[in-house]
Amino acid sequence: MKPIKDNSENPCYWDNKYSKNEIGWDIGMPTPIFVNFFKKFKSKKNILIPGAGKGHDALFLSKKNHNVFAVDFSMKAISHIKNKALDLNTSLNLICEDFFKLKNLNGKIDIILEYTFFCAINPNKRLKYIQKSSELLKTDGLFVAILLPINKILNDDGPPFGVNLPKTLRDFEKYYDIIKCEKSSLSIKPRVDNEVFVLMKKK
Ligand SMILES: C[S@@+](CC[C@H](N)C(=O)[O-])C[C@H]1O[C@@H](n2cnc3c(N)ncnc32)[C@H](O)[C@@H]1O
Protein backbone atom coordinates (compact mmCIF):
# COMPACT_ATOMS: atom_id res chain seq x y z
CA MET A 1 0.00 0.00 0.00
CA LYS A 2 1.45 3.39 -0.95
CA PRO A 3 1.68 5.99 1.83
CA ILE A 4 -0.97 8.70 1.41
CA LYS A 5 0.08 12.28 0.72
CA ASP A 6 -1.39 14.58 3.32
CA ASN A 7 -0.95 18.21 4.41
CA SER A 8 -4.23 18.41 6.24
CA GLU A 9 -2.79 18.55 9.75
CA ASN A 10 -1.26 21.96 9.14
CA PRO A 11 -3.61 24.94 9.68
CA CYS A 12 -1.55 26.90 7.10
CA TYR A 13 -2.66 24.42 4.45
CA TRP A 14 -6.28 25.38 5.14
CA ASP A 15 -5.59 29.12 5.59
CA ASN A 16 -3.96 29.06 2.19
CA LYS A 17 -7.00 27.36 0.66
CA TYR A 18 -9.30 30.03 2.12
CA SER A 19 -6.99 32.85 0.97
CA LYS A 20 -6.95 31.52 -2.58
CA ASN A 21 -10.65 30.71 -2.47
CA GLU A 22 -9.87 27.09 -3.38
CA ILE A 23 -12.75 25.81 -1.31
CA GLY A 24 -14.53 23.27 -3.48
CA TRP A 25 -16.06 21.69 -0.36
CA ASP A 26 -17.96 24.87 0.56
CA ILE A 27 -21.59 24.72 -0.56
CA GLY A 28 -22.16 28.41 0.19
CA MET A 29 -25.31 27.89 2.24
CA PRO A 30 -26.57 25.94 5.25
CA THR A 31 -26.66 22.21 4.47
CA PRO A 32 -30.23 21.32 3.35
CA ILE A 33 -30.15 17.95 5.17
CA PHE A 34 -29.27 19.68 8.45
CA VAL A 35 -31.77 22.50 7.92
CA ASN A 36 -34.45 19.84 7.57
CA PHE A 37 -33.15 17.83 10.54
CA PHE A 38 -33.23 20.83 12.89
CA LYS A 39 -36.86 21.69 12.15
CA LYS A 40 -37.89 19.35 14.97
CA PHE A 41 -35.69 20.95 17.65
CA LYS A 42 -37.62 23.72 19.33
CA SER A 43 -35.55 24.00 22.52
CA LYS A 44 -32.06 25.52 22.67
CA LYS A 45 -29.25 22.99 22.21
CA ASN A 46 -25.49 23.11 22.67
CA ILE A 47 -24.23 22.27 19.20
CA LEU A 48 -20.58 21.74 18.31
CA ILE A 49 -19.32 21.82 14.74
CA PRO A 50 -15.80 20.46 14.18
CA GLY A 51 -13.97 22.01 11.22
CA ALA A 52 -16.74 24.58 10.82
CA GLY A 53 -15.14 26.26 7.80
CA LYS A 54 -16.99 29.40 6.71
CA GLY A 55 -19.72 28.53 9.16
CA HIS A 56 -22.89 28.37 7.06
CA ASP A 57 -24.42 25.75 9.37
CA ALA A 58 -23.02 27.35 12.52
CA LEU A 59 -24.48 30.77 11.65
CA PHE A 60 -27.81 29.28 10.58
CA LEU A 61 -28.14 27.45 13.91
CA SER A 62 -27.07 30.42 16.00
CA LYS A 63 -29.74 32.49 14.21
CA LYS A 64 -32.18 29.79 15.35
CA ASN A 65 -31.06 30.60 18.92
CA HIS A 66 -29.01 27.49 19.54
CA ASN A 67 -25.77 27.77 21.52
CA VAL A 68 -23.23 26.99 18.82
CA PHE A 69 -19.55 26.12 19.22
CA ALA A 70 -17.79 26.50 15.87
CA VAL A 71 -14.35 24.88 16.01
CA ASP A 72 -11.70 25.37 13.34
CA PHE A 73 -7.93 25.72 13.55
CA SER A 74 -7.83 27.99 10.47
CA MET A 75 -7.71 31.66 11.51
CA LYS A 76 -9.09 32.59 8.09
CA ALA A 77 -12.16 30.40 8.59
CA ILE A 78 -12.80 31.66 12.11
CA SER A 79 -12.41 35.32 11.17
CA HIS A 80 -14.79 34.81 8.27
CA ILE A 81 -17.43 33.45 10.67
CA LYS A 82 -16.76 36.28 13.11
CA ASN A 83 -17.39 38.94 10.45
CA LYS A 84 -20.43 37.17 9.10
CA ALA A 85 -21.89 36.83 12.63
CA LEU A 86 -21.59 40.61 13.01
CA ASP A 87 -23.35 41.14 9.66
CA LEU A 88 -26.13 38.77 10.65
CA ASN A 89 -26.38 40.18 14.17
CA THR A 90 -25.93 36.81 15.82
CA SER A 91 -23.46 35.41 18.29
CA LEU A 92 -21.76 32.07 18.69
CA ASN A 93 -18.72 30.56 20.38
CA LEU A 94 -15.75 30.72 18.00
CA ILE A 95 -12.93 28.37 18.92
CA CYS A 96 -9.76 28.65 16.85
CA GLU A 97 -8.10 25.46 18.00
CA ASP A 98 -7.13 21.95 16.95
CA PHE A 99 -10.26 19.87 17.55
CA PHE A 100 -8.13 17.14 19.12
CA LYS A 101 -6.86 19.56 21.76
CA LEU A 102 -10.24 20.88 22.84
CA LYS A 103 -10.57 21.17 26.59
CA ASN A 104 -13.36 22.15 28.98
CA LEU A 105 -16.28 21.06 26.84
CA ASN A 106 -16.38 17.39 27.78
CA GLY A 107 -19.90 16.23 28.58
CA LYS A 108 -21.43 19.62 27.70
CA ILE A 109 -22.59 19.16 24.11
CA ASP A 110 -26.06 17.98 23.02
CA ILE A 111 -25.34 17.59 19.31
CA ILE A 112 -22.22 17.32 17.18
CA LEU A 113 -22.65 18.16 13.53
CA GLU A 114 -20.26 16.48 11.13
CA TYR A 115 -19.88 17.45 7.49
CA THR A 116 -16.62 17.31 5.52
CA PHE A 117 -14.43 17.23 8.65
CA PHE A 118 -14.22 13.44 8.94
CA CYS A 119 -12.88 13.25 5.37
CA ALA A 120 -10.56 16.23 5.89
CA ILE A 121 -8.48 14.75 8.71
CA ASN A 122 -5.85 12.09 8.22
CA PRO A 123 -7.63 8.68 8.27
CA ASN A 124 -5.27 7.53 11.01
CA LYS A 125 -7.00 10.07 13.30
CA ARG A 126 -10.53 8.91 12.66
CA LEU A 127 -10.81 6.57 15.65
CA LYS A 128 -9.46 9.32 17.86
CA TYR A 129 -12.05 11.70 16.41
CA ILE A 130 -14.87 9.26 17.12
CA GLN A 131 -13.71 8.80 20.70
CA LYS A 132 -13.15 12.52 21.29
CA SER A 133 -16.58 13.39 19.90
CA SER A 134 -18.28 10.97 22.29
CA GLU A 135 -16.37 12.51 25.22
CA LEU A 136 -17.67 15.97 24.27
CA LEU A 137 -21.27 14.81 24.21
CA LYS A 138 -23.67 14.63 27.15
CA THR A 139 -25.26 11.27 27.97
CA ASP A 140 -27.67 10.51 25.10
CA GLY A 141 -26.02 13.21 22.99
CA LEU A 142 -26.41 12.96 19.23
CA PHE A 143 -23.77 12.73 16.54
CA VAL A 144 -25.40 13.93 13.34
CA ALA A 145 -23.29 13.32 10.27
CA ILE A 146 -23.18 13.38 6.56
CA LEU A 147 -20.36 11.04 5.61
CA LEU A 148 -18.60 11.39 2.26
CA PRO A 149 -16.98 10.62 -0.14
CA ILE A 150 -18.15 7.02 0.07
CA ASN A 151 -17.21 6.26 -3.55
CA LYS A 152 -13.67 7.63 -3.56
CA ILE A 153 -10.86 5.09 -3.93
CA LEU A 154 -9.51 4.42 -0.46
CA ASN A 155 -5.82 5.15 0.03
CA ASP A 156 -5.93 7.89 -2.63
CA ASP A 157 -4.33 11.16 -1.63
CA GLY A 158 -6.48 13.69 0.18
CA PRO A 159 -8.10 15.60 1.63
CA PRO A 160 -10.78 14.57 1.08
CA PHE A 161 -9.95 11.02 2.10
CA GLY A 162 -12.35 8.29 1.03
CA VAL A 163 -14.76 6.77 3.53
CA ASN A 164 -15.22 3.01 3.74
CA LEU A 165 -18.79 3.10 5.02
CA PRO A 166 -19.14 -0.39 6.57
CA LYS A 167 -15.81 -0.05 8.40
CA THR A 168 -16.62 3.50 9.51
CA LEU A 169 -19.98 2.45 10.94
CA ARG A 170 -18.29 -0.39 12.83
CA ASP A 171 -15.83 2.15 14.28
CA PHE A 172 -18.64 4.48 15.36
CA GLU A 173 -20.54 1.58 16.92
CA LYS A 174 -17.83 1.30 19.58
CA TYR A 175 -19.15 4.57 21.04
CA TYR A 176 -22.55 5.15 19.42
CA ASP A 177 -25.85 3.43 18.64
CA ILE A 178 -26.70 4.01 15.00
CA ILE A 179 -30.28 5.22 14.73
CA LYS A 180 -30.37 5.98 11.03
CA CYS A 181 -28.07 5.57 8.03
CA GLU A 182 -29.56 6.51 4.68
CA LYS A 183 -29.08 8.36 1.44
CA SER A 184 -31.06 11.59 1.39
CA SER A 185 -33.15 13.24 -1.30
CA LEU A 186 -31.81 16.52 0.09
CA SER A 187 -28.19 15.79 -0.85
CA ILE A 188 -26.79 18.51 -3.07
CA LYS A 189 -26.64 17.39 -6.70
CA PRO A 190 -22.86 16.79 -7.07
CA ARG A 191 -22.86 14.62 -3.93
CA VAL A 192 -25.90 12.44 -4.64
CA ASP A 193 -24.91 8.76 -4.15
CA ASN A 194 -21.55 9.81 -2.73
CA GLU A 195 -22.78 10.64 0.78
CA VAL A 196 -25.02 9.25 3.51
CA PHE A 197 -26.86 10.84 6.38
CA VAL A 198 -26.08 9.08 9.67
CA LEU A 199 -27.80 9.76 12.99
CA MET A 200 -26.19 8.26 16.09
CA LYS A 201 -26.74 8.42 19.83
CA LYS A 202 -23.91 8.21 22.36
CA LYS A 203 -23.84 4.83 24.15
C1 LIG B 1 -12.94 20.52 4.08
S1 LIG B 1 -13.06 21.85 5.18
C2 LIG B 1 -14.79 21.77 5.63
C3 LIG B 1 -15.35 23.03 6.22
C4 LIG B 1 -16.85 22.98 6.51
N1 LIG B 1 -17.19 21.83 7.33
C5 LIG B 1 -17.65 22.96 5.24
O1 LIG B 1 -18.29 21.93 4.92
O2 LIG B 1 -17.64 23.97 4.54
C6 LIG B 1 -12.28 21.21 6.63
C7 LIG B 1 -12.13 22.25 7.73
O3 LIG B 1 -11.59 21.59 8.88
C8 LIG B 1 -10.59 22.40 9.46
N2 LIG B 1 -9.70 21.48 10.19
C9 LIG B 1 -8.96 20.46 9.68
N3 LIG B 1 -8.33 19.78 10.65
C10 LIG B 1 -8.66 20.41 11.83
C11 LIG B 1 -8.36 20.17 13.18
N4 LIG B 1 -7.54 19.17 13.56
N5 LIG B 1 -8.91 20.98 14.12
C12 LIG B 1 -9.75 21.99 13.76
N6 LIG B 1 -10.08 22.27 12.48
C13 LIG B 1 -9.55 21.49 11.52
C14 LIG B 1 -9.95 23.13 8.29
O4 LIG B 1 -9.33 24.31 8.68
C15 LIG B 1 -11.16 23.37 7.38
O5 LIG B 1 -11.78 24.61 7.64
Image (cartoon, rainbow, N blue to C red):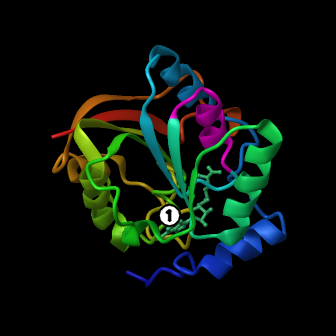
| Ligand 1 lies in quarter | bottom right
Quadrant in the rendering for residue 19:
bottom right
* Image vertical order of residue 118 relative to residue 169, above or below: below
In percent of the image, x 47 and y 67: which residue is there?
121
* Image vertical order of residue 41 relative to residue 192, above or below: above
Tell me, yes or no, whether the highlighted magenta stretch contains residue 93. Answer: no
Query: Total label count?
Result: 1
Q: Is residue 143 left or right of residue 192?
A: left
Tell me, yes or no, whether the highlighted magenta stretch contains residue 60. Answer: yes
- Disc 1 element: loop
The disc labelled 1 sits on which kind of residue? Phe
In percent of the image, x 45 and y 57: which residue is there?
118
Q: Nearer the viewer, residue 193 or 175?
A: 175
Q: Nearer the viewer, residue 129 or 135?
A: 135
x then y, percent, for residue 96: 57, 67
x then y, percent, for residue 74: 64, 70
Q: Is any atom of residue 24 visible in this view?
A: no
x then y, percent, for residue 27: 72, 43
In percent of the image, x 25 and y 34: which residue is there?
178
Q: Is any atom of residue 161 visible in this view?
A: yes
Which residues are the magenta region? 55-66
* Residue designated by label 1: 161
